[in-house]
Image: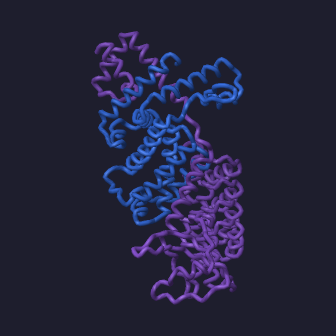
Amino acid sequence: MTCESIVPRLSLYLYGELPGEEEEQLEAHLEGCAVCRKEFATRKAVLRAIDMDQPEIPETLLTECRMELRETIARAASLRNPPRTLPRNWGWLAETFGALGGWFGGFRVPVAASALIAVGFFGARLTAPAPGVPPRPAEPAALMSAVRSVETTADGRVQIALDETRRRTVTGAISDAGIRALLLAALREEADPGVRMESMDLLKAQSVSSREVREALIGALIHDPDETIRLKAFEGLKQSGSDAGTRKAMLYALTADQNSGLRVQAIDMLTGQQDRELVGVWQALLEREQDPYIRMRCRKELQAMNASVGTF
Amino acid sequence: MTPNAAALETAGPVVERMEETDLIRAVQHGDRDAFELLVRKHDQSVLRLAMNLLRSPEDARDAYQEAFLRVYKNIHLFRFDCSFHTWLYRIATNICLDHLRKRKIRREEPAVVDTLDGQINRLDLAEEERPSADPERSFRNRQLKAKIAEALRQLTPRERVVFELRHNRGMRLRAIGATLGTSEEAAKNCLFRATQKMRGVLGDYV
């Protein structure tokens, strides 16, 4: 190999992209050629300098990106999916909350996500009821409509598609399936944290008796952006701590929640049982967790199981 | 990586043991929970890729959204004939390439901007805010940063992407070719041109 043929290969060599034979020839040449060795050192230094100039990612950017994506997809999905079935005579109320998503998804739809246009009874007169659906009686409450599409028909008239939302008041006991379905929907979907909090307060005592409530609390524990609500969800779930799904959610909160108070509660719930399956979690937490109390609990749990605390 | 993100990575295999193939199939059947898990498996690396290439949090955020929305909309077209990572990177790099190309046309990203106090190099600003015990070293660092920015500006969008994938993401040229829908040889040529340009600009400053 000559010096001229070496130079174009130096970078590929640095990246380990040269075929084996060429690599050996290049190394042999470098050993005997000070000029090429210098060029090699310069190129290495150039790449090292570039390594030191990595742009920093703002700490909150990843979380913001995830939230934004979740909201965008939830918006798209809520427009596409019809609401799930509610108990008889309660179905119409689901419209108030949009589609009722699964707990683990918990994609919350901001109320102000789509522009709402108040059209009152004018809107109601424009939209004919679907075939087979009896017309609703006139409601004293305000009718809000969001315009979804505007088209011109073949005969020159205008056709507007509207999503309608009516406000109504319902009263009932918490044991009433319809009331509970609404509270669950509010907990999952409502953008106002005050409403979610009220719903949580009413529901959390029922996590043992109702699987549906337990799943909603798990969803709130994992997904609710408000830490007070997540703490309340955790409180509610304590009573059903032996349930596998609940333990999984608590484990998730322990490793992922930003609120250290909540993580402390989670470690208190999850340790003391010497569960061999969780050895890896305690070891990883010991390495990453910043809260000294949590690290101490992890260490104790590992020691109680005679598991390694120092090497991973 | 933030502590929270690191914690999520730890939690991943414990909380959710689904294999990636199962996750993808679940997403293809409309499971949004599975989609969220799939996103969390890959999104840190996509954000880092976008940030390194676009060097702006706002643009990186746009690229992130666009990439994962495109994945969500088109996942039904994913046929497992390449790895999901390759497919995702193909989408993400194409989006970043578009951003870089538009930027070239608009001639954005000027390193030197005019201010009331005269011309300032944007890349120096962050460094200047921090007091340094060694002003000479600080000056050299600023100079080097400005030169690196200059070197990167000289690369074509494609050279920049190939360099990023090889240098920072550690991908082999064959995989880069597959990701960009080109040959290994073409990726190799791109990498060669990129490193030559950087050697030319930075050689005297290292």
In the image, taking residue A52 as reference, residue A13 lies left or right, namely left
Q: Which chain is purple?
A: A
User: Is residue A295 positioned above or below A124 on the image?
Assistant: above
In the image, taking residue A155 as reference, residue A285 lies left or right, namely right
Residue B146, image x, y percentages: 56, 25
User: Is residue A63 positioned above or below A176 on the image?
Assistant: above
Residue B164 seen from this side? yes
Quarter of the image for residue A185 reads bottom right
User: Is residue A128 positioned above or below B89 on the image?
Assistant: below
| Residue ranking furthest to the front | A156
Q: Locate the N terminus of chain A by quadrant.
A: top left
Q: How is the image coloured?
A: by chain
Residue A155, image x, y percentages: 41, 76
B78 and B23: which is toward the camera: B78
Quarter of the image for residue A310 reads top right
B71 and A22: which is toward the camera: B71
Residue at point 39%, 57% (across, down): B74
Residue A88, image x, y percentages: 55, 87
Residue A48, image x, y percentages: 50, 25
Residue A306 seen from this side? no
B14 and A150: which is toward the camera: A150
Residue at point 44%, 39% (across, down): B101
Chain B colour is blue
User: What is the total number of numbered labels drawn onto the structure image?
Assistant: 0
User: Is residue B153 positioned above or below A8 on the image?
Assistant: below
Q: Locate the C terminus of chain A by quadrant.
A: top right
